[in-house]
Amino acid sequence: MTLLGRFTVVPDGTVTTPQGFRAGGLHCGLKKTERNDLGAIVCDVPAAVAAVYTLNAFQAAPLRVTQESIAAGGRLQAMLVNSGNANACTGEQGLADARAMRDALARRLGIAEELVGVTSTGVIGELLPMTKVLAGIEALPEKVNAAGGEDFSQAILTTDLVKKVICVRVNIGGREVHIAGAAKGSGMIHPNMATMLGFVTTDANIESKHLQQLLGEATDSTFNMITVDGDTSTNDMVVVMASGLAGGEALQPGHADWEDFAAAFRHVSEHLAKAIARDGEGATKLIEVNVHGAVSQEAARAIAKTVVGSSLVKTACFGADANWGRIIAAVGRAGQPVNTETVDVSLGGITVLKQSKPVAFDEDRAEAYLKGDIVQIDVHLNMSDSGATAWGCDLTYDYVRINAAYRT
Amino acid sequence: MTLLGRFTVVPDGTVTTPQGFRAGGLHCGLKKTERNDLGAIVCDVPAAVAAVYTLNAFQAAPLRVTQESIAAGGRLQAMLVNSGNANACTGEQGLADARAMRDALARRLGIAEELVGVTSTGVIGELLPMTKVLAGIEALPEKVNAAGGEDFSQAILTTDLVKKVICVRVNIGGREVHIAGAAKGSGMIHPNMATMLGFVTTDANIESKHLQQLLGEATDSTFNMITVDGDTSTNDMVVVMASGLAGGEALQPGHADWEDFAAAFRHVSEHLAKAIARDGEGATKLIEVNVHGAVSQEAARAIAKTVVGSSLVKTACFGADANWGRIIAAVGRAGQPVNTETVDVSLGGITVLKQSKPVAFDEDRAEAYLKGDIVQIDVHLNMSDSGATAWGCDLTYDYVRINAAYRT
C-alpha cells in the first residue's frame, strides 16, 4: 500500500473494491477478435450519481439515454458499456437501440429502467448489431460479480494497450471509504471533457449534488487537461456512482474529512487521466507540461494544453530532440498573456531558456532524459502566481499507422 | 496561358515577371547542404507595400525590423530573406543582427535602410552566424537579376519539397499588369496568418493602403485557411511590393477594373496557400474542405479549419479510409452552431451522410478516390447560406520522421 497524504492506494483494487459494487464483461461480437466488448458495473443499491459529458455537438445516443435516466431519478444502479461501436450519428434508430440496451439490462436485473445508464465507444456512424448486443446483455448478469473488475476494464478498451484502473482508501470519520476508477482512452482525446470513458465507484455516503461538484472540479484539472490528438469524441463521459454502503455521516463541504475525500477523489481522476495520456495511440511516453507564473489559472491551463498538444512538441519528444523553440512557439500562440522577455523553460530540470534567453545545456544529457518514459516540461512565465499542469503523449509512427487503418 | 476569368496565368512566371523586379539567391552557409539559404527581391523603385504578420506572441526579430522599415516610409525597395535559422527568441542580439542584415543590404544597394525588409525561417533560438550572413549579403546583389526568380524561390525553402511560385496577368485599363508570388511553407503551418513566408510582387499602380486592404481580405480566405500541423510560427509573414511601373490610373476601389485586379490577386494568394498545404511536411495529398449552409462565414471558416486540421481526418485520408465519422466529430467540436439532424457529407462527390444519416456508398469507389492526390470533402450544414473553404494535407509517417529529427 502506497501512502499518499491522507489516503492510500489499494494494490489490485478495481471498481468492485468499494462496497456494494459488482462488475463483469464478455465478448458479444462487436469486436472482431475475442476480446470483451460488453460490460457492466452493478450496484447492490441505487447509487448517488454524477456525470460529465462530451461537449461535441454530435453527442452520441447512449449519452442522451444516460442523461434521461439520471434526470428521471438522480440515481443509477447499473452502467452498461460496449466497445467496438460508438452508436453515434445513428439517428432515431441509434437512440432506440440505446434505449433497448438500457431496458434489456434493467429487465434482466429486475430494476427500473431509469436506474440504468448506457455508454458506447468505437466506430461512429454504424448501427449496432442489436441481436448480438441483446444476446450479450442477456448473458451479462451471470458474468457480473465481485471479482469481475478486471473483465469490466477489458470490455471498455478499443485501441488501448493497457487497462487503466486505480483504487484508493481514505479514512472518513473512522470508517474506511474506497474510491475506484476504470477508464478507456487512446484516441480522440482532447481537453474539454469527455474525450474518454471513465467509471468511478465509491462506497462513500455522499449525495449526488456534492458528488457532481467534486467531479466537476476534478474534471477541470485532470480529464480536461489531457490531450492525445486534439479530437473531441462524440461519446465520452465520466460517471461516478456512490453506493453509500461505507455508512457514516454524509460527506459534504464542511465535513471534517471533506478535504481528504476530495484529495482522494482528485487522485483517482488524475491517475486515470495520466494513464489515458500515457497510453495515447502510438505513444511511447507521457509528456507533462507544468506552467507557472501565469496571470490566471485560465491562462496557465490554455498554455499548458497548447504546448502538450503541439504536434511539433510531440514529435520532438518522440525524437528525443531538446527543440525548445517549438515549446516557446506553442506558448506564444496560445492566445494568452505572455511577457516575451521573461520566460524560463526547463526539460526534466535541465534549464534551456532563462528570461527568454537560450541557456547553454548538455545536449547529450537532455537527449538521454528525453529518451525516458516521462518527459516533464516546465514553463515559468514569471508574470504572476497561477499555474496548471497538462498531460499528453508523443506523436509517433504508430499513431499514424493505427489511425490510417483503424476502420478497415 | 490558362484563361481564368478576367486574368491569365503566365507559364514560368516568377516574382521578377512584374516590371521593375529583380531577384536572386545564393548559399551562404546556413543550410548544411549546398542549397540556397539567402535571397532577395529588389525593385527598381521604392515600391508600395503591404504586409501581414504572425499572431504568435514571440514574433521574431526580422519581423520587427520589417515593421520598423515599413512604418518609417511606407515603401520597400528590397526584401531580404534567409532560411535555415529563424532568428526568433534570440533577444537583443537577434534584433541587432536583423538590423545589421537590413543595413548591410541597404548599404550594398545604395538605398536607405528603411527601404529594406528582412525575414527569416528555420530553427528557433539560435543566433545567426553573422560572418557568413554578412559575407552572403555582400555577394548577393551580383546574383540579383531579372532571371533570378527561380534562385530566390529556392532560397526561401526549408523542409519544402517543391517551389511555390505563380504569376498572373490581368488587363487594367488596357495595360498589362502582373501579379506574381513565391511562398515557403511546409511545417508550423496553421490558420491565423503568418504561418509561412509569402512574397508577392506586382507592377500595378496602387497605393499601399489599398494593397493592404486587398492583402487583408485575401489572407482571410486563403493563407489563414490552411493548416499543416496546427502550429503557428514565430516568423511568418506575407509581403506585397507594388512597383507601379505598369502605369495607368491608380488602382483603388471604384476603378473600373478593381474587381478584376482583386480576383487576380486573390488567385495568386490562393494558389500559394494551396501549394503550401499540398507540400506540407510529409504530405502525400491536398485536402480541401468546403463548408456550405453555415449560419455565418465565421462559423463556416471555423468548421472548415477544424475538419481539415483534425489529426484523425488527416490520417484517414492518408489511409484512404472513408471514415466520415471523424469528419462529423470534427464538425461537432468546432464550437459553432450545427444542426445535428441536417448535415450532409460527401467525399469527392460521393455522398456518405445525408441529413445526418449514413448513406450506403461504394467503399471501393471511395477508397479509389481517397488514394488520389486531392481529396475534396464537402460538408453541407443546411442551416443558412454561408460557406468557406480550407486546405490542408494528410498526416503521414514522413511527417513524424521529418519532425522527430528536424534539428539534430
Image (cartoon, coloured by chain):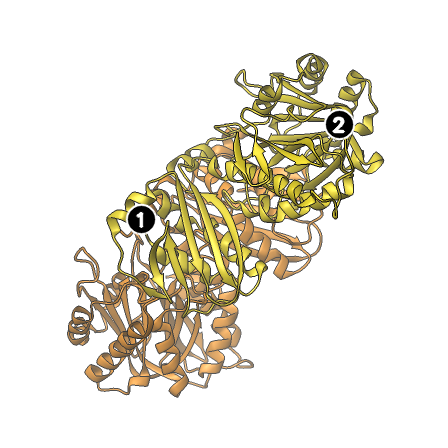
Chain colours: A yellow, B orange
Of badges 2 and 1, nearer the viewer stands 2
Question: Residue drawn at (46%, 31%), measured in percent from left and top?
Answer: A405
| Chain of residue at mark 1 | A
* Residue at disc 2, secondary structure: loop
Relative image position of residue B254 (x, y in whole percent): 56, 81
Q: Residue at x 19, y 56 (%)?
A: B32
Left or right for B182, reference A381: left
Tell me which corner region of the image, top left, top right, bottom left or bottom right, holds residue B70.
bottom left
Q: Position of residue A356 (x, y in %)?
A: 37, 66
Label 1 packing within 10 angstroms: few (<14), some (14-19), many (20+): many
Of the image marks 2 and 1, the number of the one nearer the N terminus: 2
Percent x, y for residue B354?
67, 39
Picture disc at residue A245: 2
Taking the view exactly as shown, the residue that stands out farthest to the front is A174
Q: Amino acid at mark 2?
A: Leu
Closer to us: B42 or A287: A287
Question: Disc 2 sits on a residue from what chain?
Answer: A
Instruction: Identify which amino acid the numbered label 1 is placed on.
Output: Asp
Taking the image as shown, residue A348 lies to the left or right of residue B193, namely: left
User: In which image quadrant can residue A340 be found?
Assistant: bottom left
* Other residues around mark 2 within 10 Å, as few (<14) / some (14–19) / many (≥20): some
Residue at the image point whose x is 64% and y is 24% from the top? A17
The residue that mark 1 highlights is A321
SS for callout 1: loop
Query: Residues under labels 2 and 1: Cα distance?
Result: 51 Å
The reply to whether residue B53 is visible in this rendering is yes
